């Protein structure tokens, strides 16, 4: 995998541009990767609905659940589907609207300095085996393209929006992802191979809760 430094696009991803994005603030570095989980309708997989949500084309009449979310303006940078397809909605150098009200290590507005990756899945259903190695490869590619993202700056949506969000949920195997990332770093070329190993979430920077606005 590689990221075009000019367009901010992942060359292996299917492109489905989302209007729900804007420019990052001038001088703001990308420093955080946020893992999300999504299924539409909840607990169901496949179909065009995630694309439709992120591109503002979701039909509220297609499912009762969609009536409550059809007006949302949200997006992520990437989606990794259960069949292994990777979809990009927002170039990495732009700000995707994925985190909402959020705080990381005392910093609010995580959209400003993060990249959001959605996994097609649900909190209490196992993620697909094909998604973990793809996610690890995407993360390593992002590390190479954005050296300001250190390996310890990898969190779930629930970590930066506690009490409001729960994804990617207890079914997501963080240990498996860390193992894949740590195994891969010994195969990478310097200087990336000299970077520190992936920290456990327990030793990651303190996540602070945010009061409702």
Image (cartoon, helix red, strand yellow):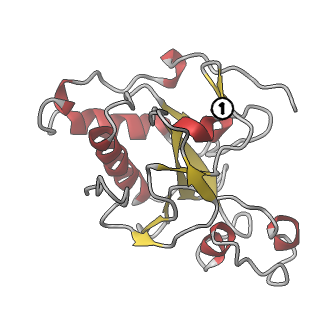
Q: Residue at x 50, y 41 (%)?
A: 173
* Relative horizontal placement of residue 71, taking residue 151 as reference (left or right): right
Give the mark count: 1
The answer to which quarter of the image holds residue 43 is bottom right
Q: Residue at x 44, y 51 (%)?
A: 92
Can residue 126 be seen from the camera position used here? no
Residue 31 position, x and y percent, is 45, 32
Residue 122 position, x and y percent, is 65, 55
Q: Residue at x 37, y 60 (%)?
A: 9
Specify the quadrant that holds the C terminus.
top right
Considering the numbered disc 1 on the image, is that residue within a helix, a strand or a loop?
Answer: helix
Residue 5 position, x and y percent, is 29, 52
Q: Nearer the viewer, residue 57 or 129?
A: 57
Callout 1: few (<14), some (14-19), or many (20+) C-alpha neighbours within 10 Å? Answer: many
> Above or below — where is 97 with respect to 143?
below
Can residue 148 be seen from the camera position used here? yes
Residue 150 position, x and y percent, is 37, 27
Q: Which residue is mark 1?
A: 160
Q: Nearer the viewer, residue 206 or 174?
A: 206
Q: Nearer the viewer, residue 37 or 174?
A: 37
Residue farthest toward the front in the current orientation of the protein:
26
The answer to which quarter of the image holds residue 65 is bottom right
Q: Residue at x 14, y 39 (%)?
A: 187
Specify the quadrant that holds the N terminus.
bottom left
> Above or below — where is 36 with respect to 211?
below
* Relative horizontal placement of residue 171, taking residue 138 as reference (left or right): right
* Relative horizontal placement of residue 196, taking residue 64 as reference (left or right): left
The answer to which quarter of the image holds residue 143 is top left
């Amino acid at each position: 995998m590689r990221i075009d430094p000019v367009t901010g696009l992942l060359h292996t991803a299917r492109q489905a541009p989302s209007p729900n994005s804007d420019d990052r603030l001038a001088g703001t570095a990308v420093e955080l990767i946020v893992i999300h989980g999504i299924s539409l309708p909840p607990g169901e997989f496949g179909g065009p609905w995630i694309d439709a949500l992120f591109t503002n084309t979701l039909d509220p009449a297609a499912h009762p659940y969609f009536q409550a979310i059809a007006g949302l303006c949200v997006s992520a940078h990437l989606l990794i589907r259960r069949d292994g397809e990777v979809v990009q909605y927002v170039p990495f150098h732009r700000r995707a609207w994925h985190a909402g009200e959020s705080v990381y290590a005392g910093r609010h507005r995580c959209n400003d300095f993060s990249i959001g990756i959605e996994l097609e899945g649900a909190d209490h259903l196992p993620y697909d085996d094909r998604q973990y190695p793809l996610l690890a490869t995407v993360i390593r590619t992002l590390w190479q393209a954005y050296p300001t993202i250190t390996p310890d700056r990898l969190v779930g949506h629930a970590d930066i929006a506690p009490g409001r969000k729960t994804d990617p949920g207890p079914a997501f195997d963080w240990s498996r992802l860390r193992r894949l990332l740590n195994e891969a770093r010994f195969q990478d070329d310097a200087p990336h191979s000299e970077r520190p190993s992936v920290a456990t979430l327990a030793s990651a920077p303190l996540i602070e809760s945010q009061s409702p606005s």
